[in-house]
Amino acid sequence: MEKKEKIGVYVCHCGTNIAGIVNVGEVSTWAAENLKDQGVVVSRDYKFMCSSLGQELIQKDIKEQGLTRVVVAACSPHLHEATFRNACKGAGLNPYLCELVSIREQASWVHTDKVAATEKSKALISGGVSRVVYNEPLEPLYVPIHPATLVVGGGIAGIQAALEIADAGFRVYLVEREPSIGGHMAQFDKTFPTLDCSACILTPRMVQAGNHPNITLLTYSEIEKVEGYVGSFTVSIRKRARSIDESTCTGCGICWEKCPKKVVDNVFEAGMGNRKAVYVPFPQAVPKYPVIDRENCTYYIKGTCKACEKFCPTKSINFTQEDEILNVQVGNVILATGYDPFDAHRITQYGYGRLANVFTSLEFERMSNAAGPTGGNILLRDGKTTPKVVGIVHCVGSRDKNYNEYCSAICCMQSLKFAHLVHERTGAEIYNFYIDIRAPAKGYEEFYHRLLDEGTHFVRGKVAEISDAVRLPGEEGKLIIQVEDTLTATQLRVPVDMAILSVGLEPRRDAKAVAKQFGISCSADGWLIERHPKLDPVATVTEGIYIAGCVQGPKDIPASVVQGAAAAARILGKIQQKEIALEPIRASINEEQCSGCRICNNMCPFNAILFHEDKMVSEVNPALCQGCGTCVAACPAGAISGTGFSNMQILSQIEGLMLLNIKSPKETVPA
Amino acid sequence: MKEYAYFPGCSLEKMAVSYHLSALETTKKLGIKLKELEDWNCCGATTYFYIDELLAYTLCARNLAIAEKTGLDIVAPCSACYKNMYFTAAHLKKDVDLAEHVNFALEEDDLHYNGGVNIKHLMEVFAQDVSAEEIKAQVTHPLEGIRVAPYYGCQIVRPQKEKEDVEQPQFFEGILSAIGATPVNYPLKMRCCGGSLIISSRTAALGMVRNLLQCAVDAQATVIATACPMCQVNLECYQQQVNQEFGTNFSFPVLYFTQLIGLAFGIPQKKLGIGKEFISIAPSLLRAGQSND
């Protein structure tokens, strides 16, 4: 070994987390004696290394003994690497010269054999010591933050996030796929548990977002391409042709009044009602401009009609309008693309689509909405009959291994709300079929009790089948819900007039594609993954990309609003800093050695490698690179090296792990 | 010409001989050869697996091993045979230890099962291996106006194959439509017929049969079509007892689906085993079939 470093080793007890299994005293003494040749000059153990006293211990040694390297044997680097690096930095040592060795997650927590765990800890520390010698001092990369933000998805989470950022004085591009913002919340009638009108609380926010001088609202638009990195993303947005001139349209409504073509509205009205070929999804839509649905418009099909153009008082109809591509610069992105409801057709035994009076929750929302297709009257599919008995089936598609294993979080409360609305408007007898009632938030349990007082029946059991097969007297013309009441262990056949399937929430059908576009990942279920499920729920592993609302997992309106605001706050903090420090763990390509084979170009999950056609070499963009090391391993010429993960570091760590540097390994390695 | 290893099973030799005859006749028309498996043995039926699992697996595996030698897919017309063989093949694939035990026993007979046999129910042949167009091409006497209750029974889609719909499948209806009949909405089409429950719990079993019959009556069907000898027996032969037990008045014809296909193909009734049933089939059905020989 050429260099002679002065290394300090610090072994943490972590209370009894480590010390309960690993003999930390023995490990510390062993390191002092046996790793002397590698440069260890001091080795200590301490109850809580991460405490300020523990950190001071390290800092004192750095200053007094002139340590040039530090190895901390404690928990996983995920938890406290930053803590100890900062401690070293505080004492004047480059933070990247500190190496964390995990003897908790990788030794004490996973083993029961104390002797073996102690020996393993020694080997892990030996590896860390061998490696740290080759650690290079690194400096973080600083990149400027563009103050504008892109918010994808104009539901309540996206609206909230956009308003927070815009109110703080920064530009927001709010992009929404549908012709209006508002999302699912705009479709609902009432909100649980307070029963305030969904539109009444939502539409002021929509108007605010639509009028805000700092918000550029791009509806009927989709993201085409995302390039760049935290602080400076370039986003291409396809603004689909509305066939309406927005500069002159007043939203007067004459066009959709005159349009002769009726279309079943499968989006906003969930198939329960119609709209015209030129339409706004609902009266309070923001923006107020309609859209011509070219797939259904008679003019685009047959070449004649143009009724809208004839009657438009401001000549705003433009049949030849084309899609526009807008390129915008933003520093950060919030994805708030929401959810899709579970497709109830998939559970064939519940008869949705086969039995007329089986409804989905979204259909019921529209039916109970005063502005909806039945004017708020709860009616059977014939459009005339008020049901006398209504069954509400919980957990449709949720908590079920055949469909989605997770709980969709909102369906219990949604079902209770439905039960209340049915009770209030029809006086019908109501059955709720539930697995468990989950009412954990503020005012929710009280709402459940209110429903119990209203006389709603609650049957604990998962519905086996909804059928029209009559078996007993009294079942004629009814839907029969077959269920086991698990509280009394009895099979029940409950005849009802109407069944409402409280369907669960699913990731958007294109969630995976969106995640890929923005360089983040989905869980196995398809929800976008946050950086930390508890401590960092709105950030993602890709710097500058945040998530809010149901795109991260099923949640109710208050939780979506909270996440929207939280993501906005995180971004405002970044904007205020004006620049961001990036972890300097990066790959770099040696131009001399690069053969230009481009194998690494497609391997990079962050699209961080660009190819210079002129020089025929690849180059890593350090601001985009996340230091994953994929390209390093893939390069056939060995031209790519990863900072912090050089071959010397890895190989010597392996040597150290195998205790090859120690004189009499046989004595220390258990047989 | 498509060829399959045909496993008739014990029932088709006597009790369900009409199923056997009609299966052979109809497949022949479609250019399919059902080559009876040589020296086959009982599948273990509904009971043997509960008495000695290992021996029951060995019993089934013997048939599979013989079929494997032919290199053909094995076809069973009986749902219970099909289920037993399918289960056995699946378990042998998953459980190496079981496969070793079973093959040890099979060696006595110079046999070995390597896990390479596809197991099909006869209905899968009609629903998947033959297209609806091919069936339609053979129809000379479409069963127009005949309302048929497609009774799948509980075993034909259980175990579930991949993403198959086990609650409301539609392939039986597809076959019936192809021969010109009207498949009715038969909500209990996947329900159990009782199997061998009639032996141990007579009233409960009769109740199950009653529900199935009543459902067919409510659906205004002319005939129930079955795909399993066990279902056929329970639904047809116990109607008298159902009537005694519950004071009902059922006299509802039950036929094998292959018999209906045969009628539509214009195959003489005798060759389809028609005339052997307890409850005579509706004249309208025979008229549609028109094969008054």
Image: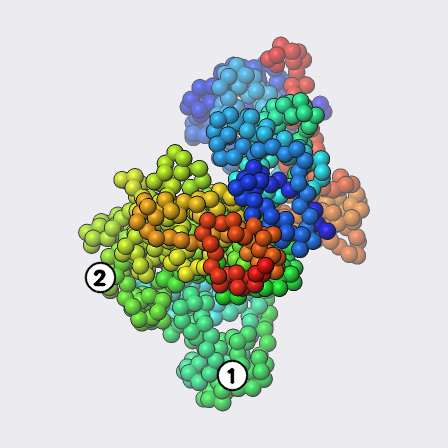
Image vertical order of residue B186 relative to residue B100, above or below: below
In 3D space, how far apart are the residues under numbered discs 2 and 1 (Cα atoms)?
A: 48 Å
Do badges 2 and 1 share one subunit? yes
* Foreground pick, A345 / A335: A345
**What percent of the width, then of the height, locates residue A104?**
50, 26
Q: Give me the residue at 59% from left, 66% from top.
A: A327
* Foreground pick, A508 / A242: A508
Q: Secondary structure at mark 1?
A: loop
Farthest residue to the front: give it. Answer: B293
Which residue is disc 2 drawn over?
A427
> Crowding at label 1, few (<14), some or many (≥20) Cα neighbours within 10 Å?
many
Q: Earlier in the sequence, mark 2 or mark 1?
A: 1
**What percent of the width, then of the height, locates residue A174?**
48, 64
Residue A546 visible in the snapshot: no
Q: Which mark is residue A450?
A: none
Residue A298 visible in the snapshot: yes
Left or right: A378 in relation to A221: left
Which residue is disc 1 drawn over?
A317
Image vertical order of residue A125 relative to residue A412, above or below: above
Q: Give me the residue at 57% from left, 80% from top.
A: A300
Chain assignment, label 1: A
Farthest residue to the top: give it. Answer: A667
**What percent of the width, then of the height, locates residue B173?**
52, 57
Q: Secondary structure at mark 2?
A: loop
